Amino acid sequence: MNDQPIYTDQHGVRRFKANAIVEYLLNNGPFDMNHLAIRDFSDADRAQFAQLIGYSVSGWGGLPYVSDEDWDRVHTPPAPATAGGDGTEDER
């Protein structure tokens, strides 16, 4: 699974960057989280969806469908930020 980028929000919480299209569909479509919860989606799809809607990293790790392998890959604290070639910091 490819992971969404991670950033630190204004409260110091590490979060996955939400996907604007997925958020729009969830907030404006005919389906809500309760409807999606009862559908037969794979654990991998559910884990990716939680990233796409901007879950906190720690909350995501506690979801029953996130594997230990995925959690181990994601929860490791980021390496110290380094300045990129354009003067921005690398969040990963």
Image (cartoon, rainbow, N blue to C red):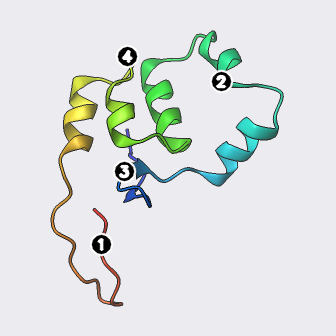
Q: Earlier in the sequence, mark 1 or mark 2?
A: 2
Name the front one of labels 2 and 3: 3
State the separation of the CA atoms marked 2 and 3: 22 Å
Q: What residue type is labelled 3?
A: Val
State the separation of the CA atoms marked 1 and 4: 30 Å
Q: Which of marks 1 and 4 is nearer the N terminus?
A: 4
Residue 57 drawn above or below residue 89: above
**C-beta proximity under 8 Å, tags 1 and 2:** no
Please state if 87 lies on the left or on the right of 81 as rendered.
Answer: right
Position of the N terminus, as image quadrant, is top left
Q: Which amino acid does label 1 sit on?
A: Asp
Question: Could you classify mark 2 by the number of other residues whose Cα lies within 10 Å: few (under 14), some (14-19), or many (20 or more)?
Answer: few
Q: Is mark 3 on a helix, strand or loop?
A: loop
Image coordinates for residue 64, horizontal then vertical, percent: 37, 16
Disc 3: which residue: 13
Most distant residue in the front direction? 11
Disc 1: which residue: 90
